[in-house]
Image: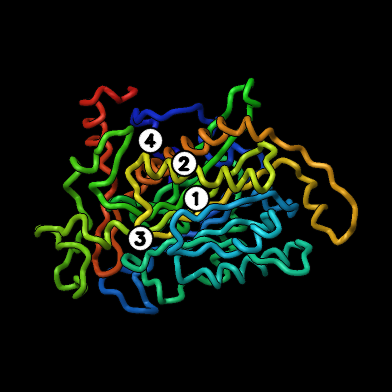
Amino acid sequence: MSASRVRARDLGIPFSGTPGPLNAITDVAGVEVGHATLSWGEGRLEVGKGPVRTGVTAVFPRGRADPRLAFGGSFVLSGTGELTGLAYLEERGFVEGPVMITNSHSIGVVRDASIQWMLQHGWDFDATIPIVGETYDGFFNDINGGHIRKEHVWQALDASRPGVVHEGNVGGGTGMMCYEFKGGIGTSSRRLSDPEGGYTVGALVQANYGSRAQLRIAGITVGRSLTQDMPCYTDPALRPELSRYGVCGGSPVSGAKECRDGSIIIVLATDAPLLPHQLNRLAKRPALAIGRLGGVAASWSGDIFIAFSTANADAGKSDEAVAKACQVTLYPNRALTPLFEAAIDATEEAIVNAMVAAETCTGANGLRLSALPHVRVQEILRAHRLLSI
């Protein structure tokens, strides 16, 4: 995927707040992101053979070379999903190691391989429980085929870098759908003004939720006008007996219950010196961004968010079994509102960026997921005098 891919702002879609230089989670110094993308095969789904449309995404709070702990927090908006290590995180208040994202049935191998990677690279711990989130791609990928293996997890970890983050059909987002368009990985950031501290908040999402009619962009119900290019099976002979969608050329079934359900994993990073209880509060705010875009946290949706701070780099010393106090810097609780707003704004744009970057793709059983139609979205926003270019 090209690093110069068009993003939402390039289309003139308006957003609130001031982004960082890269408009990515990696605007928070130290954060690194890597992907491993698996994509091969076509036609009828055969378990163990494909088609394969999946992957792994890794987010390091302090980079691959820095194993120091980071204060963290989390929030579960809708719990029909999984993010391993949440109990461990909530009890200790620390993120230890990378945050990983993959498909629903690959959590175990990603967890195990992450431990082995950390051991191989000399990370020192008695025991650890990696944080691994998931969203379901079984409608598009051979999810039961066990295609993600240790080497793919290590590929994502080893590929992690600062700088530009690839978006769309990459990593864990390879097989995802968002508002019945192709979904996937997206990122964005916001920088607070100098009087507010000049801190940065970055968001990275794996977006796999929502029905077409729900989609709002810039406050406009664009999904109701984007009735073409619904998910469809390109070959009626390959269409599963219990299909969610219609066949191309026929009458796609839009707004079915199955289309409304889905999941999203959101990772927030900040360099503001927040403690775990404050990061729990910050981690709640992406829910408001989902609401801005029309999402409803459906009954069968796994909407799980995690937040970490790269400040207080030596705070992990407080996790040692030594009765010695460790000093930390505390951000004022009453001054958190600008950070909350930054998290909401960055998450909103990250989700739209995921959709703008994602490309039309055909997966298992010939199911085709179409890209968000850039020109049509611009036309709709222009008609409402909202396009910024």
Quote the CA–CA distance across marks 4 and 3.
29 Å
Quote the CA–CA distance across marks 3 and 2.
21 Å
The amino acid type, in three-letter code, at marker 1 is Ile
Judged left or right of residue 374, residue 107 is right
Report x, y in % for residue 323. 90, 56
- Location of the C terminus by quadrant is top left
Quote the CA–CA distance across marks 2 and 1.
8 Å
The amino acid type, in three-letter code, at marker 4 is Ala
Report x, y in % for residue 119. 73, 67
Report x, y in % for residue 191. 57, 29
Quote the CA–CA distance across marks 3 and 1.
18 Å
Of 52 and 330, which appears nearest the observer?
Answer: 330
Report the residue marked by disc 3.
299
Indicate the secondary structure of the residue bearing disc 1. Answer: strand
Q: Quadrant of residue 240?
A: bottom left
Residue lying at 50% horizontally and 42% vertically, measured from the top left: 285
Q: Which mark is residue 347?
A: 2
Q: Nearer the observer, disc 4 or disc 3?
A: 3
Report x, y in % for residue 384. 23, 25
The amino acid type, in three-letter code, at marker 2 is Thr
User: How busy is the neighbourhood of tag 4: few (under 14 within 10 Å), some, or many (20 plus)?
Assistant: some
In this view of the protein, can residue 373 be seen by the observer? yes
167 shown above or below 54: above
